[in-house]
Image: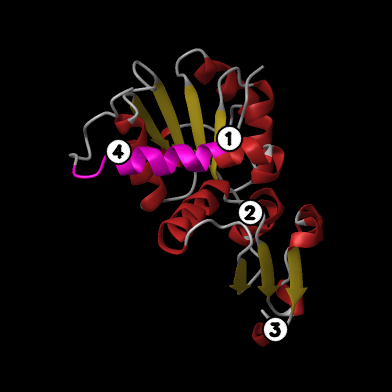
Amino acid sequence: MVRHFLDIHRLDAADLRAILDDAHARKAARKGWPQGRADADAPGEDRVLAMIFEKNSTRTRFSFDAAIRQLGGSSIIATASDMQLGRGEPVEDTARVLSRMVDAVMIRANDHEDVERFARVSTVPVVNGLTDRSHPCQILADLQTIEEHRGPIAGKTIAWIGDGNNVCHSFMHAAPKFGFHLNVACPAEYHPDLRDLAKGANAVTLTSDPREA
């Protein structure tokens, strides 16, 4: 069965913890190395990652490209102007074709449903690089940074002050998985999607007063 990474709430807490621990270990092992050198175990050797960017990106594009190289693999990058994703060619057809040419696909899309449709028929792993609904990879990177500077995230409280956007949704998904509490403060008209709030279970508190966060 192909495993995708579309949203944090879809993975088990143990798997998420293992991903973060592996990221910590790989970063520590690479200290002082040239950025282009592959990790000693090169788990991505001979693997090709396709990266599809419907939305422009700096950090996501460079970080994913550097990451697959450091894992021993290579990447193919396509923007909205390079392909017909959902325009003249169904998303499902694109997924079937790419599944025969690459080993994994990362998509940064405008519409979350397009990524869902792609993943449903893809026979290779699909990673959500950002959609209008969530940004799971950003949250894992944020949690890694917090742990590097403040220690284990479990038991801590994080304050989110701003609109309830895609990054906020993924933070809410992460709170119960990693054992931290998230206080979300935003005006009522900018509240996060209640479906995503529910996925935060009892680990998320919503308020309109930033002082309460």
Residue at image mark 1: 87
Q: Residue 107: x, y in percent? A: 52, 38
Alpha-carbon distance for marks 1 and 4? 43 Å
Which residue occupies the foreground of this view, 13 or 135? 13
User: What's the mark number on residue 213?
Assistant: none
Quarter holding residue 208: bottom right
Number of residues whose C-alpha sits closer than 10 Å to that of mark 3, classed few (under 14), some (14–19) or many (20 or more):
few
Alpha-carbon distance for marks 2 and 4? 28 Å
Question: On the rendered image, what quadrant is the N terminus found in?
Answer: top right
Q: Residue flagged by tag 1: what amino acid is it?
A: Arg
Residue 29 on the magenta span: yes
Q: In this view, does 158 lie above or below 27?
A: below
Q: Residue flagged by tag 4: what amino acid is it?
A: Ala
Give the secondary structure at mark 3: helix
Which residue occupies the foreground of this view, 74 or 53? 74
Alpha-carbon distance for marks 3 and 2? 21 Å
C-beta proximity under 8 Å, tags 1 and 4: no
Q: In this view, does 25 lie above or below 212?
A: above
Residue at image mark 3: 212
Q: What stretch of residues is rendered in magenta?
A: 18-32
Which comes before the other along the chain, label 3 or label 2? 2
Which comes before the other along the chain, label 1 or label 4? 4
Residue at image mark 2: 170
Give the secondary structure at mark 1: loop
Quarter holding residue 109: top right
Residue at image mark 4: 29
Chief secondary structure of the magenta portion: helix
Dot in front, 1 or 3: 3
Question: On the rendered image, what quadrant is the C terminus found in?
Answer: bottom right
Q: Residue flagged by tag 2: what amino acid is it?
A: Ser
Number of residues whose C-alpha sits closer than 10 Å to that of mark 2, classed few (under 14), some (14–19) or many (20 or more):
many
